[in-house]
Image: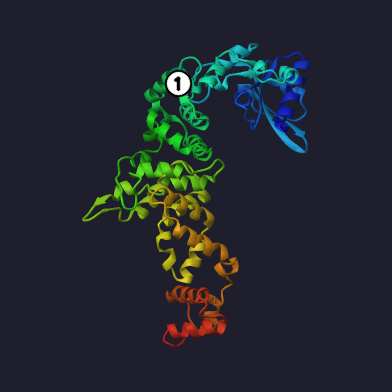
Amino acid sequence: MGESPAQIAAENIVDRLRAAGYDAYFAGGCVRDLLLGRQPEDFDVATSAHPDEVLGMFPRTFAVGAHFGVILVADEIEGREIVTEVATFRSDGAYSDGRRPESVRFSESAEEDVVRRDFTINGMLLDPQLLRESGEVGSSVLDYVHGRADLQARLVRAIGDPDKRFDEDKLRMLRAVRFAARFEFEIEAATAAAIRESASQIAKVSHERVRDELTRMLTEGRARRAFELLDRTGLLTEVLPEISRLQGVEQPPEYHPEGDVWVHTLMLLEQLPAGVSPTLAWGALLHDVGKPATFQRGPGRIRFNGHVEVGVRIAQDIARRLRFSNEETTQIVALVENHMRFGDVEKMKASTLKRFFRLPAFSEHLALHRMDCMASHGGLELYEYAKQRFAETPAEDVRPELLITGRDLIEAGFQPGPQFKELLAQAEDAQLEGRISTKEEGLALIRSLSNGTPIP
């Protein structure tokens, strides 16, 4: 595994700081990933240099968190701009808001710095000079919190007292779940017990931070494991009670032999690859969220009449609560709203099918339908039909330039009114179905639809 531009940039910073007489190390997640044989996405540096000293030592810096000892250092490596977070060793004062310390005290001690961090696997330091000399990650690590042992044991363990760690920053409870899911680790027993005890405190965390953490869980390739852990720790009912309600909701076995709605949803989440679109991931999670409220055990079978419409409203509420952007909300809700339409795809008129294909990011609708099938009966006939028709239909046929516009109707003597929209829609349907191919044919159709007499 060669050195990435991010690693080179961080090494340059460490070398510069050490040349000036300061201690400096790689810190946090990059050390964990190197020990696991993974390529870190970014590298953080911890140092005994104070923020003002870091600011004066590098030409391009950003004091984004100087009060907490955090400076961003920018450099260009191999034609890419790399921004590295450089944090001063510190100890923290009291946390009153469940997120940030009220005060910090800068320190000369690396050990004092790491014991205030979240989890042992994230609390290790690495000496890049030793790494260059030895070529071995293990012999270059400073481990004051026994993080290597927990990596070996595949455990996520809070540093020190877990109750204190979670009281300092409530979001750490969700982070524990995410790390355990991402690496297929277990949450250490005392750490898991502290999460269950404090799960209700997650309500003190901003909706945006919760949303971002959940989105990471959904898009890192271990979404099923993450949501099973959320459920096991009691966090699921706190952050997404609507999803918790899927548990125990029976489904008709002839269509859903896999089990209840919760199991079905977990099976969809299991199919989400790392790097999946966040909107598709949330669409998969929420696609059947309307089923608990619409469950009916009628004659012959279980039904969920209106579950799509109810699901749309619930999805809108969740998106609003978690502060999704308007664009993200529109796509997530569209995935919920349209996921059942594939059942009619073979019977759709050409115009209806082409309008279906017009849905923004239609590939996400296709992907959700495939996952939905694979998590239930397994039949992919409708998916294959829709996929083939979508692939072979040119974009200009899906959304052609209209033969008839409102201006054309006015020029033909029609007066704008309530029927305008319906007449134009029928003309467009005829065009999409190939029944008309010229403006003249379109106007003739409209005249026949309006009893052959232009409306003065």
Tell me if residue 381 comes above or below residue 406 in the rendering.
above
Q: Residue furthest bottom?
A: 453
Left/right of residue 36 with respect to residue 305 in the rendered view: right
- Give, as a three-letter code, the residue at label 1: Glu
The residue tagged 1 is: 188
Residue 173 spot, x, y in % from top left: 46, 27
Q: Is residue 93 visible?
A: yes
The crowd level at tag 1 (other Cα within 10 Å; few <14, some 14-19, many 20+) is some
Q: Residue at x 73, y 24 (%)?
A: 11
Give 82 or 415, whichever is nearer the viewer. Answer: 82
Given residues 94 and 365, the one toward you in this image is: 365
Q: Is residue 310 above or below residue 168?
A: below
Task: Give the x, y percent position of residue 287.
Answer: 41, 49
Residue 174, given in percent of the width and then of the height, sits at: 47, 30
Labels in figure, total: 1
Q: Picture coordinates of residue 121 (x, y %)?
A: 55, 21
**Left or right: where 272 falls relative to 394:** left
Q: Which is nearer the eye, 452 or 306?
A: 306
Q: What colour scheme has been applied to the protein in the rendered image?
A: rainbow
For image coordinates 43% across by 36% down, the residue present is 227
| Visible residue check, residue 456 | no
